[in-house]
Image: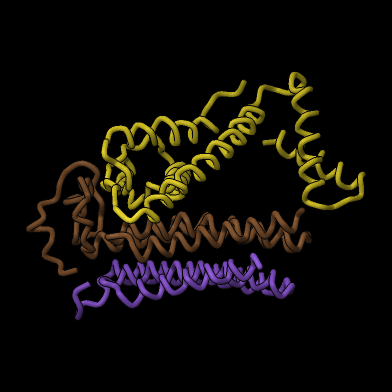
Amino acid sequence: MSLFLTNLLLALLWVSLSGNFSPANLLFGYLIGYLALFLSRRAFAPSNYFGVVERLVRFVFFFAWELIVANLRVAYEVLTPRHNMHPRVIALPLQAHTDFEISALAILISLTPGTLSLDVSADKKVLYIHAMFAEDEESVRNDIQNNLEARLLAIWRQPPS
Amino acid sequence: MAQNLSALLILLGALFMFIAALGVARMPDLFTRMHSSTKSATLGVGLIMLGAALHFGEIGMTMRVVAIIVFVFLTAPVAAHMLGRAAYFAGVPLWEGTLSDALRGHYDRRTHRLLSDEKVDETSAGDLAV
Amino acid sequence: MILWLTIGLLIAAVLLCLYRVARGPSLPDRVVGLDLLSSVTVGFIAVYAVVSGEIIYIDVATVLALIAFLGTVAFAYFIEKGGMPWRKT
């Protein structure tokens, strides 16, 4: 956390020294600060800041790709005249525990076309989702658990390196 | 260059919105309609907003656009979740092509609690007219 | 030219939403139609801001996006608490 604040401070310093307060320049300053901190990471106590940032960036790209592919799939289903979808309501056992993890997962599931989260059970163990292309129930469940949920939880659960 | 890219983004966004509306008009049941309306519409709004930001190219504009995009991406799933839950509760029928329904019998109709394992007896729990 | 094509697409989207709102068959279906209608309107306002060159319209889009979410949530709450008991949904 303190590394993040240091990084932000470096970005602000870059912006004020270069005298150009635009979002792009702020981002550039943040990147330079990140690089500087990364190169001198042995000087600080072990922290999971670098790992978190790297996995977060990877996850954003992974999710953007999923969003595009799956949106095209739903668009194809809408535009072709015959319905060849196989909807199901599926119970998905959760590995996420805290409220934040569950709501993040539910939002991401809803934004991935083809799946829509309906409700969480009262004891927060099962998430019920409506899946549009679910001929094979088990493969949909595995896909979400191994791809989306595992990657999401790995962002902040992995130990510092 | 930026103008062409912005026009392309706006056109793509409008195309996704059209697909979303077509899906809402065409899909056979409520839940498949919600699939179409939440995702394609969210993506459509995002693309149109990005195109508009690129067209104007000002800081204040970009900030507002980022705020709208973040807000829409956070709230659209929440609205879909609340509406889907309420509709399932109110007994909106599923499409006849739906293969299985894991939610059936898991709602306690009197307390509105959703149970994860044990099934509720539909006949005794369903006496609350919905 | 492209902007007029965009506006045509959005108008078609509005008409399709209105079809769903009029057709139903249940109240949640109509709410889905209205929700999408407000999203399309947000997009429409943004496109109009580009056409007219007035940034101020984006603020209108922001406010509409905020209010549309509240409307959908209120409808969902209403349906879950029993909806219209005098009518079968």
**Residue furthest to the left:** B123
Residue at the (37%, 51%) spot, across then down: A77
Residue at the (62%, 20%) spot, across then down: A161
Determine whether A111 is above or below A59 in the image: below
For the rendered model, the colour scheme is by chain
Residue B41, how many percent across, how many down? 49, 60
Question: In terms of depth relative to the viewer, which is nearer, B42 or A7?
Answer: B42
In this rendering, position of residue B123 left or right of residue C5: left
Quadrant holding the C terminus of chain B: bottom left
Of the chain colours in the picture, the one used for chain C is purple
In this rendering, position of residue B31 left or right of residue A25: left
Chain assigned yellow:
A
Determine whether A156 is above or below C74 in the image: above
Residue at the (31%, 33%) spot, across then down: A139
**Residue furthest to the bottom:** C86
Q: Can residue A133 be seen in this view?
A: yes
Residue B125, how many percent across, how many down? 12, 58
Kindly indicate the quadrant of the structure image that contains residue C53.
bottom right
Residue at the (45%, 36%) spot, across then down: A148
Tag count: 0
Residue B56, how many percent across, how many down? 76, 63
Chain assigned brown:
B
Kindly indicate the quadrant of the structure image that contains residue B31.
bottom left
